[in-house]
């Protein structure tokens, strides 16, 4: 197994653990409430990450709650190469803005940015640090974004027997979808999963993932990812290899 595949597998394990560690509450439903998946619904859930992977590169807009503020990430993800490139800003006044280019293990950031998301990143001013999802909601979100694609479908039969639940029927941009609560991973205190996991998937009839939510970093608010179906430009090359390590306080 390659280093990238090992890192992706480890990050996915971390994802399941992180998204189940905070308490779950019953979702706001428009109909009868959570229930087990039918065979057809399990098939759609099983395809969701695979259809994202098959897209190759896609645009994403993500809002991430973090210590009373909201971080907005706007950019593109290459699910086949496990790469992301985006502009980040928070809701401070004035907002803090930076560029980020990340892999499954590291993020390289260009702070004090004011120019939107350029097709060609600037050649200087980048700092690199390892992703530390257990300490940072933002780092958790970056890893989750890369893991929304997988190179093969999940096991539909296992999903149908898992704790995954249909939450409700909904629409995203006029497209009918099912909203599914992902399988809950066991908590640290018990081997039994919580009633509903801390992930939600909005999936259309063809198994395409149009929206994703997760609770990260112990936050009560949801991280939300919008995945429009429009085509996206390829990601630019990563920043220069000589980028300086970021200060440890970042």
Image (cartoon, rainbow, N blue to C red):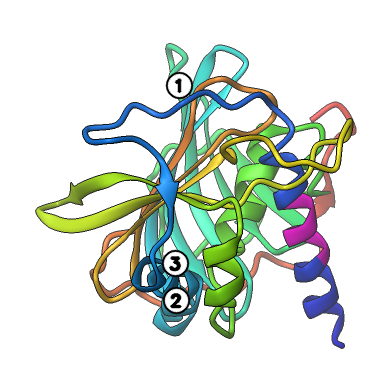
* Relative to 134, residue 218 above or below: above
Q: Residue at x 87, y 79 (%)?
A: 3
In the image as oriented, which residue stretches furthest toward the left? 174
Q: How many numbered dots are placed on residues in this image?
A: 3
Give the percent coordinates (x, y) of residue 194: 67, 35
Which residue is denoted by mark 3 in the rendering?
A: 45
At mark 2, the secondary structure is: helix
Horizontal side of residue 146 vs 232, given as left or right = right
Q: Confirm or deny contact between disc 3 and disc 2 (CB under 8 A).
A: yes
Where residue 82 sits, quadrant-wise, is: bottom right
- Quote the CA–CA distance across marks 2 and 1: 38 Å
- On the rendered image, what quadrant is the N terminus found in? bottom right
Return the mark for residue 207.
Answer: none
- Quote the CA–CA distance across marks 3 and 2: 5 Å
- Quote the CA–CA distance across marks 3 and 1: 37 Å
**Front residue (pair 151, 156):** 156
| Residue 78 falls inside the magenta stretch | no
Return the mark for residue 95.
Answer: 1
Which residue is denoted by mark 2 in the rendering?
A: 47
């Amino acid at each position: 197994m390659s280093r990238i595949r090992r890192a992706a597998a480890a990050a996915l394990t971390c994802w399941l653990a992180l998204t189940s560690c905070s308490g779950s509450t019953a979702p706001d439903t428009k109909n009868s409430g959570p229930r087990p998946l039918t065979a057809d619904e399990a098939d759609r859930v099983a395809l969701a990450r695979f259809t994202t992977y098959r897209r190759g590169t896609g645009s994403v807009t993500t809002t991430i709650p973090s210590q009373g503020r909201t971080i907005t990430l706007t950019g593109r993800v290459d699910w086949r190469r496990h790469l992301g490139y985006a502009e980040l800003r928070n809701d401070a006044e004035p907002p803090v803005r930076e560029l980020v280019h990340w892999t499954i293990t590291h993020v390289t950031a260009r702070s004090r940015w004011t120019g939107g998301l350029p097709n060609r990143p600037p050649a200087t001013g980048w700092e690199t640090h390892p992703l530390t999802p257990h300490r940072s909601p933002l780092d958790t979100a970056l890893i989750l974004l890369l893991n929304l694609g997988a190179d093969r479908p999940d096991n539909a039969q296992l999903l149908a027997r898992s704790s995954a639940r249909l939450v409700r029927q909904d629409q995203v941009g006029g497209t009918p979808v099912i909203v599914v609560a992902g399988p809950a991973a066991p908590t640290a205190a018990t081997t039994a999963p919580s009633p509903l996991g801390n992930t939600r998937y909005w999936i259309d009839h063809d198994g395409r993932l149009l929206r994703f939510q997760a609770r990260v970093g112990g936050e009560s608010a949801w991280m939300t990812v919008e995945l429009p179906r429009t085509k996206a430009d390829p990601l630019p090359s990563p920043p220069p290899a000589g980028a300086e390590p970021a200060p440890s306080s970042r």
